[in-house]
Image (spheres, grey):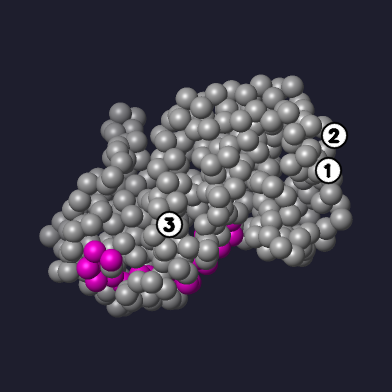
């Protein structure tokens, strides 16, 4: 990016997207104040799995953007920014019924059409790679180029290597406009003056944007086990059930739907998720939902019966009305850029989308076409309603 030392940007939201934008803005010479109602990674970023996954994305813009975002992780790891935090690992798309096998095959074809490497894995090979897999598993595809990174660790690294001002416990009340342009952010009675504002506050973005009800809270419950291994991940890849793909593709969407993933962590533990509970913004877990998740997990991978659940937790993801993230200039208010609505794809897309948002704030074109994510699409919908 070109140097932009004269500009002061207020970034609202210290999750992975806001942290990435702040980092790359500061690297370009901008002065940055990062504001968060709580603290870095305290929202969805800190309550998520670590899938840097193209395999999980629905066909179209999301799949294409995820390929760019994963390549961005690879570059940042190679350049040292994410060294030790981003790890290559396969994703296994797993079917347990004939109907699910058809869905996995269709999704695999979409991935291959997007340029992704897709490997069909027979049951014998899969059992050699992941001993103990459930008897119900009848088909699987391996996506070998995916990866893993924990969102809170990436956020910490980005902020730790940035010269920015971080304001914790600083909830933004409104974006102050003067002469039709953003002039700063109000925190209580205080004005944090700024030349431009990035809104990357997840569900907290909604009251700041004035664009109607375009954001939807989607709660997800998860569980973490004790260690099955003392020397890295306990199994050779991330297990993603067809139920998760169905939810992403809009095939099976009822409130509380379980889209199963079994995520082997670098600590040797398993992260198991998760529910997709629309219009829920609380952080409580309940025994019924966690039990449903664990039953699904045990059917897919029975050795989990030997593990203890250490804790359960919930995060609130922010989805948009049409299922795509919202990234781009505010359609009505000059000097405001929006980067929100990433739902469960924020860890994968976050660093790259933050870098793209930084370019927009500096008056530069992003490195990819973000037209499909433009906030302007909601204004057009309202105009034709």
Left or right: where 283 falls relative to 353:
right
38 inside magenta stretch: yes
Residue at far left of view: 179
Q: Residues within 10 Å of mark 2 (few under 14, many from 20)?
A: few
Q: Which residue is mark 2?
A: 135
Q: Of callouts 1 and 3, which one flags the residue occurring earlier in the amino acid sequence?
A: 3
Q: Secondary structure at mark 2?
A: loop
Residue 256 vs residue 364, the one in the foreground: 364
Mark 1–mark 2 contact, CB under 8 Å?
A: no
* Between marks 2 and 3 in the image, the one whose residue lies nearer the viewer: 3
Marks 1 and 2, how far apart at CA: 9 Å
Can residue 377 be seen by looking at this rendering? Answer: yes
Q: Which residue is mark 1?
A: 132
Q: Please provide percent x and percent y for residue 49.
A: 60, 54
* Between marks 1 and 3 in the image, the one whose residue lies nearer the viewer: 3
Q: Quadrant of the C terminus?
A: top left
Left or right: where 147 falls relative to 274:
left
Segment tinted magenta in the rendering: 27-48
Q: Which residue is mark 3?
A: 78
The quadrant holding residue 223 is: bottom right
Can residue 343 be seen by looking at this rendering? Answer: no
Marks 2 and 3, how far apart at CA: 40 Å
Q: Of callouts 2 and 3, which one flags the residue occurring earlier in the amino acid sequence?
A: 3
């Amino acid at each position: 990016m070109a140097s932009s030392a004269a500009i002061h940007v207020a970034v609202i939201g210290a999750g992975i997207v806001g942290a990435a934008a702040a980092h790359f803005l500061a690297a370009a010479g901008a002065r940055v104040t990062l504001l968060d109602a709580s603290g870095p990674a305290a929202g969805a970023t800190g309550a998520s799995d670590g899938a840097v996954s193209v395999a999980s994305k629905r066909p179209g813009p999301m799949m294409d953007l995820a390929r760019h975002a994963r390549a961005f992780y690879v570059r940042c790891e190679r350049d040292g920014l994410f060294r030790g935090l981003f790890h290559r690992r396969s994703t296994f798309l797993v079917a347990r019924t004939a109907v699910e096998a058809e869905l996995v095959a269709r999704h695999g074809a979409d991935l291959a059409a997007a340029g992704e490497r897709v490997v069909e894995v027979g049951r014998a090979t899969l059992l050699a790679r992941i001993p103990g897999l459930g008897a119900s598993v009848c088909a699987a595809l391996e996506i070998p180029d995916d990866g893993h990174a924990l969102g809170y660790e990436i956020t910490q690294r980005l902020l730790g290597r940035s010269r920015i001002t971080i304001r914790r416990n600083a909830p933004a009340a409104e974006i102050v406009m003067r002469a039709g342009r953003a002039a700063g952010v109000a925190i209580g009675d205080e004005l944090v003056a700024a030349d431009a504002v990035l809104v990357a506050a997840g569900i907290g973005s909604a009251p700041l944007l004035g664009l109607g009800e375009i954001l939807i809270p989607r709660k997800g419950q998860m569980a973490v086990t004790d260690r099955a291994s003392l020397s890295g991940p306990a199994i050779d890849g991330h297990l993603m059930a067809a139920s998760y793909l169905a939810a992403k593709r809009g095939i099976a969407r009822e409130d509380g739907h379980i889209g199963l993933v079994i995520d082997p962590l670098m600590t040797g533990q398993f992260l198991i998720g998760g529910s997709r509970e629309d219009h829920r913004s609380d952080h409580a877990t309940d025994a019924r939902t966690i039990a449903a998740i664990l039953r699904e997990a045990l059917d897919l991978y029975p050795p989990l019966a030997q593990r203890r659940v250490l804790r359960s937790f919930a995060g609130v993801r922010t989805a948009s009305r049409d299922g795509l993230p919202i990234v781009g200039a505010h359609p009505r208010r000059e000097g405001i850029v929006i980067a929100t609505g990433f739902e469960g794809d924020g860890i994968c897309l976050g660093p790259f989308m933050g870098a793209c948002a930084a370019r927009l704030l500096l008056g530069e074109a992003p490195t990819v076409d973000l037209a499909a994510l433009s906030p302007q699409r909601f204004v057009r919908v309202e105009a034709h309603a």
